[in-house]
Image (cartoon, rainbow, N blue to C red):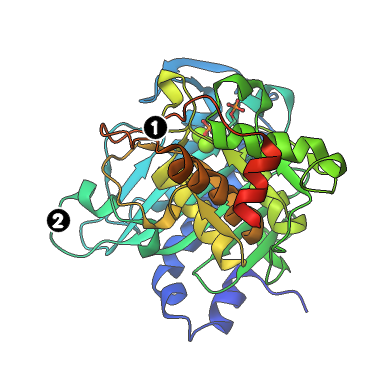
Amino acid sequence: MSLSLNEYIWQHRSDASLQRVAPLLLGVAQACSQIASAVRNAALNHASGAAGTDNIQGEAQQKLDVISNDIMVAATQELARVLASEEVEQVIAGNPTADLALVFDPLDGSSNLDVNISVGTIFSILSAPQGGSDEAVCLQSGTRQLCAGYALYGPATMLVITTGMGVNGFTYQEETGLFVLTHPDLRIAPQAQEFAINASNQRHWEQPIQAYIADCLEGRDGVRERDFNMRWVASMVAEVHRILLRGGVFLYPADSRAKTRNGKLRLLYEANPMAMLVEAAGGAASTGQMRLLAIEPTELHQRVPVILGAKDEVALIEGYFNQGNSKYGLAADTSGGISMRQAHPPSHQTLFETIFN
Ligand SMILES: O=P(O)(O)OC[C@H]1O[C@](O)(COP(=O)(O)O)[C@@H](O)[C@@H]1O
Ligand SMILES: [Mg+2]
Ligand SMILES: [Mg+2]
């Protein structure tokens, strides 16, 4: 029997978080179905290409970034006390009587729009207790998320959600306009056979990432003693979806360039919701040096290094970072940034053996 999102919420009436976020979650789902339509018909509606404006990150906005943001705000502003969006510098005031906050990336992977490759929407729902500024309400650690999810606008439109216990995927049914449960209880295998990283940044990476990827690339001829596959879509939603369905790890590390010294992805509306989903599916999410969900945010649009997916593989990558810290006595970056490792690493063979033997 196919279960719609509404029916799923009713069936899980003992899940207090789900019941609390249900109206807002349904608002998000409605917005996502509208964004899917906007994305699908953009070329026909002259909604493709650049908007001619930059967002707060200094990135050129696509028309669809702006359209998706407006759709999301219109569908949810009455249902949350405060909204925060990748595309808007300050928080957006919502309904003062509501007790939830919604933080979102309205369109993720928008560099893929003009080439008709999958994009998505990422969202996180937090409690908004009385008192405290609207911005402070959004600056809660990922462990405090009540619900997280994403919509994927690919060959099928899907909504994938968690309230912390299990991850469920719903597929949008055109005929009925409903999201139908098609992928219940998604789980990530602890071992990975596939990694995802933008290899064009290789020369800027920190030493632990250099060493880890080099070991993967050596495959069965190196210390890993097996071959790895690689993928890079450049849409985080598509990468995380693939990992939820068939495993692997995703890395967007910090690197030596000024603009990515703390990573590229945004903590509140990219890393945290994805980390909650991945952990709820049995995986792990880390900066390389700490659990992503434990970070106490300080800024709405702050960036963070992201390593997530198969639990054992993420632990292994953390081992490369720990090894770097202890063996070379590398100083922490006192400015709060991510410190770059120094040269003179041992051979990959030695590093791997020291960590795992
Ligand atoms: O072009 P790059 O650096 O590989 O970037 C890809 C990454 O940037 C992002 O596209 C950022 O998302 P936005 O489109 O929301 O800015 C991620 O989805 C993705 O992981
Ligand atoms: Mg994004
Ligand atoms: Mg975006």
Whether residues under marks 2 and 1 lie with C-beta atoms below 8 angstroms apart, the answer is no
Q: Could you say which disc has been placed on residue 339 in the image?
A: 1
Which amino acid, by three-letter code, is at mark 2? Gly
Q: Residue furthest bottom?
A: 14
Residue drawn at x 68%, y 37% is: 348
Which amino acid, by three-letter code, is at mark 1? Ser
Quarter-wise, where is residue 236 in the image? top right
Residue 259 at x, y = what percent? 42, 21
Residue 48 in view: no
Helix, strand or loop at label 1? It is loop
How far apart marks 2 and 1 lie (CA) works out to 33 Å
Quarter-wise, where is residue 73 in the image? top left
Give the residue number, with chain letter if any, for mark 2.
Answer: 132
Name the front one of labels 2 and 1.
1
Relative to 217, does residue 25 appear above or below in the rendering?
A: below
Residue 221 in view: yes
Residue drawn at x 59%, y 48% is: 317
Horizontal side of 148 relative to 114 (left or right) equals left
Q: Along the line of sight, which residue is nearer the eye, 322 or 315?
A: 322
Q: Could you say which disc has been placed on residue 7 in the image?
A: none
Instruction: Using a 10 Å C-alpha cutoff, classify the residue at mark 1 as few (fewer than 14 neighbours), some (14 to 19) or many (20 or more).
Output: some
Residue drawn at x 66%, y 21% is: 200
Residue drawn at x 48%, y 86% is: 14
Q: Along the line of sight, which residue is nearer the eye, 10 or 248?
A: 248
Q: Along the line of sight, which residue is nearer the eye, 220 or 242?
A: 220
Relative to 341, does residue 97 appear above or below in the rendering?
A: below
Helix, strand or loop at label 2? It is loop
Horizontal side of 57 relative to 281 (left or right) equals left
